[in-house]
Amino acid sequence: MFKVYILRLADESYYIGSTEDLRERLNEHRRGRVRTTKDNLPFKLVHEEAFSSRSEAQSREYQIKKWKSRKAIERLFRK
């Protein structure tokens, strides 16, 4: 199972990613091993979606990233 996930970082920005092992990926973020998030810890997992293939998850990740709108991203998890 592949996941697309969104983190809200300490500076209130969002990080959008995809992974096959969400638990391990979140641990990498927590340990500061992800260059783009290590300076904005702690974070909160605010959204996740499951997909059966890597290509589906990556397509969704890129779709969300293309929105570039905070409001559009927040609509995913603020209902």
Image (cartoon, rainbow, N blue to C red):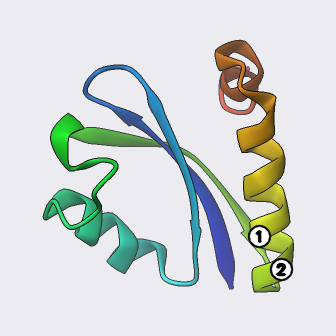
Specify the farthest residue to the top: 71
Numbered marks: total: 2
Disc 2, SS: helix
Residue at numbered disc 1: 57
Label 2 – label 1 distance at C-alpha: 5 Å
* Residue located 77% across and 21% down the image: 72
Label of residue 55 in the image = 2
Q: Quadrant of residue 65?
A: top right
Indicate whether 1 appears above or below 34: below
Around disc 2, counting alpha carbons within 10 Å, would you say few (fewer than 14), some (14 to 19), or many (20 or more)?
Answer: few
Q: Quadrant of the C terminus?
A: top right
Indicate whether 15 appears above or below 31: above
User: Residue 70 at what x, y percent from top left?
Assistant: 64, 17
Instruction: Please indicate whether residue 24 sits to the left or right of residue 40 in the image.
Output: right
Indicate whether 63 appears above or below 24: above
User: Residue 40 at what x, y percent from top left?
Assistant: 22, 36
Q: Quadrant of the N terminus?
A: bottom right
Indicate whether 26 appears above or below 6: below
